Amino acid sequence: MTVKIGIAGIAGRMGRLLAEEAAAAGASLSGGIDAPGTTLPNDAGAFADIAALAAASDVILEFTHASAIASHAAAMAGTGKAWLIGTTGLSAADEAAVAEAAKHIAVMYAPNYSPGVVLAMALAERMAAALPAALYDAEIVEMHHRQKVDAPSGSAVGLGRAVARGRGVKLEEVTESGRDGHTGARKTGAIGFAALRGGQIVGEHTLSFTSATEQISLTHRAFDRRAFANGAIRAALWVAGRKPGLYDMTDVLDMR
């Protein structure tokens, strides 16, 4: 049976790519929603809101803004349809709303849908477990296009969470981000973040573990947003029709 895909944020750069990749994968585009007054792609049906779009779809792909997540979570919970979230910059309250929706519907939530980034995060966790925090300083540097509104990026945070899991700590308790001025010496066990913005760079992430005697770095560079769009469509086809729960790309790639 052909999977019907609806896209929240369909007029954006990612939204348009998702529509193309959905067609290439043999899925059916039911339509989309975007900000009022936005021109949707010619072949996309317009819907009043996310609930109406869900009624005509098997799975909704969300690439909008963090400010929309809480209200969309409440709306999606009652639809019985799967929901894939690609929006980044979610707050703790937003993530709690997502988790609540996952009690009622299948929710796919990942900081990045590129298989390469997912594998990098898995490697990051293993590296963190093997390299003691007392000896190896973990730093994450990311760079994106100048239009990106959240920092550090969702993928950088995902890498940080992987390092924290490997070390058995909570990321929010060891984060050092945006150092400026007389900050004092680096704290042992900290996970550092630096966010760079410029031009039209799709996405670059480097995680480095540095000791007094060596450095090991893990880098992922995205050359085309289609890497994310391809992965998101793959995940959407996987999550459509699943039982309620909170899933991520490790489920899609069978890495658990």
Image (cartoon, rainbow, N blue to C red):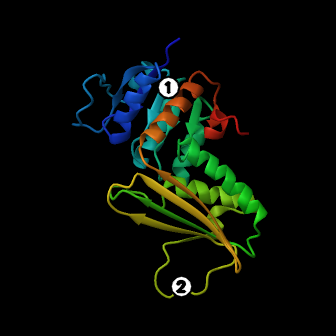
In which image quadrant can residue 203 be found? bottom left
Residue 38 is at least partly visible in this image: yes
Distance (Cα) linking label 2 and label 1: 47 Å
User: Which secondary structure lies at badge 1?
Assistant: strand
Q: Which residue is pictured at 65% across the width and 79% down the height?
A: 187
Q: Which residue is pictured at 44% across the width and 61% down the height?
A: 143
Q: Residues within 10 Å of mark 2 (few under 14, many from 20)?
A: few
Amino acid at circle 2: Thr
Residue 74 is at least partly visible in this image: no
Give coordinates of residue 22: x percent, y percent.
43, 26
- Image quarter hosting the C terminus: top right
Give the residue pinned by disc 1.
Answer: 59
User: Which secondary structure lies at badge 2?
Assistant: loop
In which image quadrant can residue 110 be found? top right
Q: Which residue is pictured at 77% across the width and 69% down the height?
A: 132
Q: Nearer the viewer, residue 141 or 174?
A: 141
Q: Which residue is pictured at 33% across the width and 55% down the height?
A: 200
Give coordinates of residue 176: x percent, y percent.
57, 72
Give coordinates of residue 109: x percent, y percent.
56, 41
The reply to whether callout 2 and callout 1 are in contact (CB within 8 Å) is: no
Amino acid at circle 1: Val
In the rendered structure, which disc, 2 or 1, sits on the residue that comes first in sequence?
1
Q: Nearer the viewer, residue 19 or 70?
A: 19
Q: Residue furthest top?
A: 1
Give coordinates of residue 233: x percent, y percent.
49, 30
Give the residue pinned by disc 2.
Answer: 183
In which image quadrant can residue 44 be found? top left
53 relative to 114, above or below: above
Figure disc tally:
2
In screen coordinates, is 25 left or right of 14? right
In screen coordinates, is 91 left or right of 45? right
